Image (cartoon, rainbow, N blue to C red):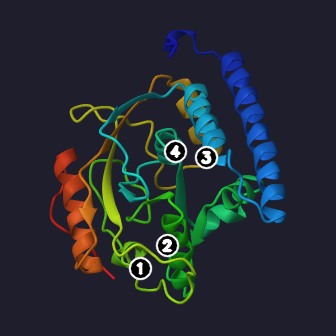
Amino acid sequence: MKQLSRSFITNRWIIWQLIRIGGHLLIALVLALLIALIQKIGRDCLWQSSAMLWWYRRLCRLLQLQITTNGQPAPAALLVANHISWLDIPVLAAQAPVRFLSKAEVRQWPIIGWIAEVIGTQFIARGANQSATVIINLQRQLTAGHSVVIFAEGTTSDGSSIGRFHPRLFAVAQHELSAPQITSAAPPTTHIQPVALRYGSANAPDRIAPFINDDQLFAHLIRILRHPGICATVTFLPSITSAGQSRRALADATHQSIAQHLGLNERPVSFD
């Protein structure tokens, strides 16, 4: 990827990058419209995965992200990652075709929320009663061979620690709610793969990438464009089988795997 010296960052360059990113979002809208039309006639969109993989990879280039990947994503797995920024989504989606579980507020975002829904994102409200329906929908995606990404903390952090993991989300891997709602046979177990995300390095964490507190999306985007070359490291850790384990045990094991790799708090801190 072409590196751009920060000394050459100007308002004119930032405006140009915003125009390019806006154009790229229009491409996503066109792709989503085509996918929605294909879905409406009851057919599978065979090119959706490859198209979205290309789209996310180009978005990462437009954002001038420098991504290092360690390990390989497991196929049709529940990928559980620590959560630092909205950048986590394009960074992970640029690695392999994946579906996401997102907070319900994202569905209300103009255009972006609708696009996310069309490409398979599931939305969950904090403390809502519809979590069983969401989990069943995610199980359907796993059964169909898709990998699903969840951010089990439910919120972002600055990367210096990992928040508590929600055990209820790990019901996705247990298929306790599968029958009779899922017509095709669900696999007896789902592999859970911990994914460790880091921006910067262990000794010098990046302070621009975290999207926390009262950060606003557009203002955060401008900050990212003013600091090109943010380094993101994605590490796919050894998978954990869900067979015979409780949700809390799965949450604690996944938390410990990620925390240990990142050298952060390793004490299991799940709740629910």
Q: Are marks 3 and 4 in contact (CB under 8 Å)?
A: no
- Please tell me which of labels 3 and 1 falls first in the chain: 3
Q: Quadrant of residue 90?
A: top right
Whole-Å distance between the Cαs marked 2 and 3?
Answer: 18 Å
**Which numbered disc flags the more N-terminal residue, 1 or 2?**
2
Question: Which residue is labeled 4 in the image?
Answer: 93
At label 3, which amino acid type do we have? Ser
| Residue at 18 percent of width and 57 percent of height | 265
Q: CA distance from mark 3 to mark 4?
A: 10 Å
Q: Which residue is mark 2?
A: 139
Q: Amino acid at mark 4?
A: Ala
Q: Tell which circle, 3 or 4, labels the residue nearer the N-terminal end.
A: 3
Q: CA distance from mark 1 to mark 2?
A: 7 Å
**Which is more toward the observer, 231 or 161?**
231
Marks 1 and 4 sit apart, C-alpha to C-alpha, by 24 Å
Task: Provide the residue designation for mark 3.
Answer: 49
